[in-house]
Image (cartoon, rainbow, N blue to C red):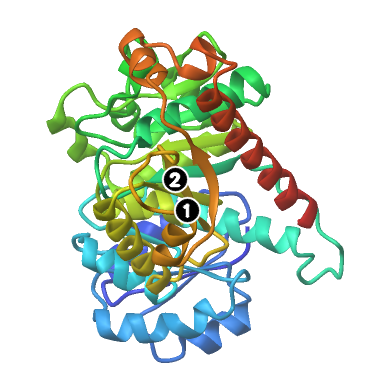
Amino acid sequence: MGAIIIVDRDPEFSSKLEKLLCREPGQSVLVVPALGRIADQVAETDALVVVFGPSLPLDGVMEAAAPLAARQPTTASVLVVPKITTELMRQAMRSGFNDVVGADGTFGEVASAVLDAGADVLKRREASGWATGGQGLPDGRGHVATVFSTKGGVGKTVIASNLGVALAGNLGKRTVLLDLDLRFGDTGIMLGLRPERTIYDAVQAFDRLDASMMRGYLTRHPSGLDVLLAPLRPEEAESVTASRLARIIGLLREDADVVVIDTPAAFDDTVLTAIDKSDEVFAVATMDVASIKNTRISLQKLRQLGYGDGLVKLVLNRADSKVWLELSEVERAVEGDIVGKIPSDRLVPRSVNKGTPVVTDAPKSPVARSLVDLARLIVAHKEARNNVA
């Protein structure tokens, strides 16, 4: 890897992190105690990553990060803070940070986040032909598709589960489904799986975790889909921090063609982390005014955070509901185009109760075909991304 710059006023923090990072072969680390010349130092060293430590004033850090964000994809920035909050995550993302890590975790977690950010920058430099004049090569990472809505009851888990099975079983893609509803995830029930190991178990081995070890925490569905299930008990969710989740998503995409993430009805730091690590986000809405209003607000917020229409796409569930609304009205209301329309069908609740996805329980039904079409769209987007790279 190239140079990493650590900026912090606390020499103990800088020294401990430097020692961990320097264990990587060929890794060079520059420690600076203040923000003053950071932009010049990045340019002089051609740094891959700048780490802003927890003793720095946040206002100064946010201001210093702005010019670094303009250098993307050639430099990443990682913020280490005493405690992560949702508002802080949003502020950091607006300022262009690639990752935010809590100082209340281990130094191993901080080092992993920094090295991951550096690896991502190297891949982006390769893909863009940066500094070589070349055309670039596909980076080979798995494609991450997140199913998102801040409103419950819109069918996120049904859609995510069926997408995973369609990608693995129908389209032959090595696929992992991540249940990110950490307190009350239902993916296991939807797929008729008996959980033996969950994301909580993976977190317990976090400091030793790699892509190969990660496979041991996945549960295999008969379709060939691998699932990283939610914790068995709600209190176990607390151990899955945003920085740990970012690392886990990175490991999953190393070993899969596609990673599908099913999110809870929330806008917290774990959901923002999933969105930040995604290649595309499917915002799910239904044909009712409350859902459409909620979707509009969510999409506006995502745009404010820098996630444009190229990332976020609209999927309309129960799209054929006769509720005096036209699809064109929905598109105007949410200010986005609909890329997927899932019809209503009594086969869906039946398949949920059976623990069998509708794409396998009733493969010729209109609802199953629409879900497989959406899975094909994901594959097309993945291939297009690789072709561009």
| Residue 324 shown left or right of residue 168 in the figure | left
Q: Is residue 278 above or below residue 88?
A: above
> Callout 2, which amino acid?
Leu
- Which residue is at the front of the view, 345 or 86? 345
Q: Which residue is mark 1?
A: 327
Position above or below: 174 against 1:
above
Q: Residues within 10 Å of mark 1 (few under 14, many from 20)?
A: some
Q: Is residue 278 visible?
A: no
Quarter of the image where one finds residue 276:
bottom left
**Image-quadrant location for residue 33:** bottom left
Please give the name of the residue rendered at 62% of the width and 41% of the height, measured from the top-left corner: 378
Asked if labels 1 and 2 touch by Cβ distance under 8 angstroms, the answer is yes
Q: Position of residue 143 (x, y in %)?
A: 60, 42
Whether residue 385 is visible:
yes
Residue 187 % position (x, y): 34, 24
Q: Quadrant of the N terminus?
A: bottom right
Query: Looking at the image, is 273 positioned above or below residue 61?
Result: above
In this view, the residue in front, 377 or 337, is 337
Sequence order check, earlier mark of 2 and 1: 2
Residue hosting label 2 = 316
Q: Amino acid at mark 1?
A: Leu
Q: Which residue is pictured at 20% across the width and 35% down the height?
A: 237
Q: Residue at x 66, y 60 (%)?
A: 124
